Amino acid sequence: MSITAEDVKARLSAVIDPNTQKDFVTSKSVKNIKVEGGNISLDVELGYPARSQIEAIRTAVTAALQAIPGAEQVSANVYSKIISHTVQRGVKLMPNVKNIIAVASGKGGVGKSTTAVNLALALAAEGAAVGILDADIYGPSQPMMLGITGWPESKDGKTMEPLENHGLQVSSIGFMIDPDEPMVWRGPMVVQALTQLLEQTNWRDLDYLIVDMPPGTGDIQLTLSQKVPVTGAVIVTTPQDIALLDARKGLKMFEKVGIPILGVVENMSTHICSNCGHAEAIFGHGGGEKMCADFGVDFLGALPLTMAIREQTDSGRPTVVAEPDGPVATVYKEIARKVAVTVAEKAKDMSSKFPSIVIKND
């Protein structure tokens, strides 16, 4: 009895993608099935960056198909393809940027910028083209965190090239001011500066642009949320009740402007003693998970309060770069994968498919 494409689909409907928790047929990842006698070839298209996952997925798919009676040679081409997904209604996508992810917090000091940079680095480590926009005009920290100094180059006098390090394209007001110079600007000036940073940076074919948002829920955040085409937002908090109170406000702000919440990250979940390794929940326990349960959003992960994270970030080599195989980097990578999978499951942006209608008076 000869093997058919339906036999292949039947087998793969029982193989679960460990990252999406869906089988490869239901998720429409299986494409271009070809069967010639006992030889089977197919493509498995993943909607999220998965450099570290591809080999395991290929092995699982190949093993399932080789178990078909009569199967001889199986060739599974597993690859990632990142596409643009829907944003707020009435906001146009940016050229050369497929998906914008805002990383926000209701208050400062909860490790939002550290989360943003490690999230960006983790996505890049999985093979995605990633940029990071330092939107915290009053306190830009990404230049130090990424170990970047210098002035952005302009090739045409109107736009500027992003600076780069650790595989990320970066734009920040911090590249254009003295580090000791305070930004004594009112809201409208800050919004204008931020808009220029976003739109006048020559981002080069980004799969993801991570926006390190300023803390709070004021005019700047609201304007950004209404004008910038955001695919989704990640909320950063600590387990402390006062931080959760503000994080909830940040979450509700995004909901009001129609931006999906991709999940919540809990920083400083436990303190790890550098001498004895004892773990203690000094800021409380389970607050982030309870918040997620209250609002029906995903809990992306919890990160410890350790000296290493602070030292690595201050030195310009964040954890994902400094200790790529360490336990904390593993958590950041798991968070990044969850975010990318959630983005991949959102509706595809179809705005480019619609024709532009121009009315002329003859």
Image (spheres, grey):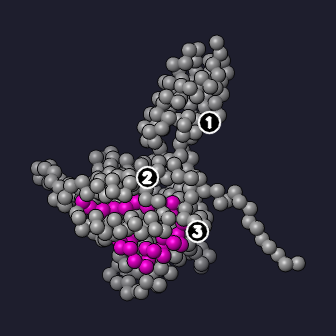
From the image, tell me which residue sits under label 1: 31
Residue type at mark 1?
Lys
Query: Which image quadrant: the N terminus?
Result: top right
Specify which label sits upstream in the sequence, 1 or 3: 1
**Left or right of 96 on screen, residue 49:** left
Q: Nearer the viewer, residue 153 or 59?
A: 59
From the image, tell me which residue sits under label 3: 91
Residue type at mark 3?
Val
Instruction: Report the label total.
Output: 3
Q: CA distance from mark 2 to mark 1?
A: 24 Å
Spot occupied by residue 264 in the image (x, y as percentages of width and height) = 35, 57
Image: magenta residue range: 213-239
Q: Nearer the viewer, residue 280 or 106?
A: 106
Residue type at mark 2?
Val
Residue depicted at x 29% and y 47%: 326
Spot occupied by residue 40 in the image (x, y as percentages of width and height) = 61, 24
Residue depicted at x 52% and y 69%: 228
Mark 2 neighbour density, 10 Å: few (under 14) some (14–19) many (20 or more): many
Q: CA distance from mark 1 to mark 3?
A: 32 Å
Q: 105 above or below 338?
A: below
